[in-house]
Image (cartoon, helix red, strand yellow):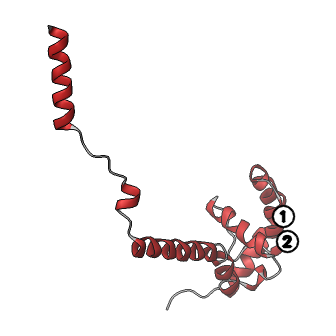
C-alpha cells in the first residue's frame, strides 16, 4: 500500500512541479552589447600595448642628456634602479649607469662602491650647474 501511495505522489508532483528547461545562451543574446564589448577589449588591448613604450618616451624627452647614450632597454632598467633607491636622473654618468644596468640587483652596491669617486665627482659637477630657488 505504501509503495502505491509513493508512486502516486511521485507521478502527481512530477506533473505539477516540472520546470521548463531554459537555454540562456540562445534566449538571451545581445549582439549590440557583444560587439561593443569586443571593440572595447580591442581598444584596451591597444592602449595597454602602447603603455609599454611610455616610460622610454618620457625618459628620452625629460632629464639630462647624459642618458642619450643608453638604449631603450637600459632606460627601462633605470626605472628598476630608481625604485631600489639608486639615483639615475642627474648622476651618475652614463658609464656607471651602464655598469649598473648590466649588473644583477645583488651586485648594484658593489658597482656603486667601485665607482664612488666618479659618482662624487658627478655630484659636485651637478651641484655647480643646478639652480635653486625662485
Q: Position of residue 78 (x, y in %)?
A: 71, 68
Residue at the spot of label 2: 95
Give me the C-alpha separation between circle 1 and circle 2: 6 Å
The quadrant of the picture occupied by the N terminus is top left
Check the image and name the residue furthest to the bottom: 134
**Residue 114 lies in quadrant:** bottom right
Which residue extends farthest top?
1
Q: Which residue is at the front of the view, 28 or 100?
A: 28
Mark 2 is surrounded, within 10 Å at the Cα level, by few (under 14), some (14 to 19) or many (20 or more) other residues, namely some
Look at mark 1 in the image and give the residue it sits on.
99
> From the viewer's perspective, is 14 left or right of 35?
left
The reply to whether discs 1 and 2 touch (Cβ–Cβ < 8 Å) is yes
Total label count?
A: 2
- Residue 92 seen: no
Judge by depth and name the residue closer to the eye, 103 or 15. 15
> Which of 36/100 is in front?
36
21 above or below 92? Answer: above
Q: Name the residue: 78% across, 59% down.
A: 112
Image position of 67 (left or right of 25): right
Amino acid at each position: 500500500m505504501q509503495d502505491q501511495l509513493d508512486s502516486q505522489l511521485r507521478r502527481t508532483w512530477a506533473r505539477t512541479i516540472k520546470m521548463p528547461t531554459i537555454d540562456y545562451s540562445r534566449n538571451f543574446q545581445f549582439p549590440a552589447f557583444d560587439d561593443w564589448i569586443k571593440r572595447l577589449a580591442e581598444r584596451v588591448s591597444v592602449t595597454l600595448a602602447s603603455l609599454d613604450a611610455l616610460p622610454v618616451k618620457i625618459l628620452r624627452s625629460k632629464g639630462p642628456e647624459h642618458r642619450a647614450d643608453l638604449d631603450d632597454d637600459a632606460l627601462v632598467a633605470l626605472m628598476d634602479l630608481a625604485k631600489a633607491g639608486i639615483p639615475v636622473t642627474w648622476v651618475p654618468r652614463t658609464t656607471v649607469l651602464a655598469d649598473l644596468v648590466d649588473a644583477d640587483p645583488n651586485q648594484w652596491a658593489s658597482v656603486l662602491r667601485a665607482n664612488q669617486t666618479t659618482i662624487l665627482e658627478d655630484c659636485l659637477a651637478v651641484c655647480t650647474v643646478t639652480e635653486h630657488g625662485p
